[in-house]
Amino acid sequence: MIYLDNAATTLRKPPEVIEAVVQAMNGMGNASRGTHFGSLTASRTIHEARGKIARLFGCKRADHVVLTCNATEALNIAINGTVNSGSHVITTDLEHNSVLRPLYRLQAQQQVELSFVAADRRGNIDETAFEKLIRPHTQAIVLTHASNLTGNMVDVTRVGRIAKKHNLLFIVDASQTAGSFPIDMQTMGIDILCFTGHKAMMGPQGTGGMCIREGIKIRPLKVGGTGVMTYSKEQPFELPALLEAGTQNAHGIAGLSAAVDYIYSVGLEAIREKKDILTRRFYNGVIGIAGVTVYGDFSAKHHAAVVALNIRDYDSGAVTDELSQSYGIATRSGAHCAPRMHQALGTTERGAVRFSFSWLTQVDEVDQAIRAVKELAE
């Protein structure tokens, strides 16, 4: 199989990640739940992982790295734990449902008002539009670093300056960029960074988290056991325990920790550069094919490793099935949990076929995918 669905999850993992998970499953107990070897090993592994992640994303305090099961959980904690009833939040048309649905629920249940920075037909937004949408009761800006459908990226640093100027909370969904692009919370002005471990970070599924700037207060989404302050009726107030009720996925976090080590060993710039080469190679190979429509703006300097397209008037699901069954190529069709983006692109009826690449994708796989698209278009 040629696996080109890496924007959903990376199928191929570095061997070091797999080995770390196997070792963890053979030797780790429950973190923060005992003083025996198995528990202490899990606790130390998680502690070390926090430090590595904090360094990767420019988070000043490792204890402000909260580990979750994915970016969706992190975004739910961040949004539900900070946005107040009756406030106003600004977001964009680029967002995944992991951002949209928590906001829509707050809109319905807590009278939170929402404004959207519109995307054009190329999937771009105008960052200056954020300032125009600010109201007296605006509390937060929530946005994605890169669209999971078009790969178009947002100038997060520019938006961060706007948020800081108006004293707004700034929450960023880095699901498509963490592990591929440099992210520094301090220079970008990010208050809460949410990420997932199973995509570009090349870690196991069931891993992810959030990095929180000092001084940000978050209400816990869930409460329960933490291994500390057992006799208190309230959730422990200190991070990370405040937001990490229940047994942690120490086995997965061990793999995520190894994945971060791998990223450091290879180099973030090398990873970004290779993925950019693969993405542009595929784009250049399909853009001139008669009957193929490509979505997104590839004139920008930086672009996530995603290319979405349609072939003539075929339904995207039919194209994806044909790619899988006849060519052994795995892609993603449909709406990609990005409804407003499809509305902006005019693809709500048939969706789009998304090809997405990873550090471990090979050039010949990209070329085979180009040939497949050409044959289907013909």
Image (spheres, rainbow, N blue to C red):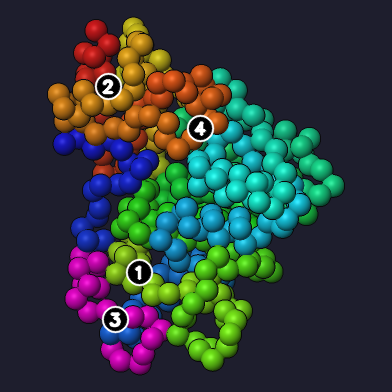
Q: Is residue 288 left or right of residue 79?
A: left
Q: Answer with the quarter of the image where residue 120 lies.
A: top right
| Residue at x-position 61% and y-position 58% | 80
Q: Which residue is mark 1?
A: 249
Which quadrant holds residue 358?
top left
The residue positioned 50% from the left and 42% from the top of the image is 97
Secondary structure at numbered mark 4: helix
Neighbour tally class for label 4: few under 14, some 14-19, many 20 plus, Cα within 10 Å: some
Question: Is the C-beta separation of discs 3 and 2 under 8 Å?
Answer: no
Task: Identify the secondary structure beneath mark 3.
Answer: loop
The disc placed on residue 339 is 4
- Residue at 44% x, 20% y is 349
* Three-letter residue code for mark 3: Gly
Question: Distance of mark 1 from mark 2, alpha carbons?
Answer: 37 Å
Q: Residue at x 60, y 48 (%)?
A: 105
310 vs 178, nearest the viewer? 310
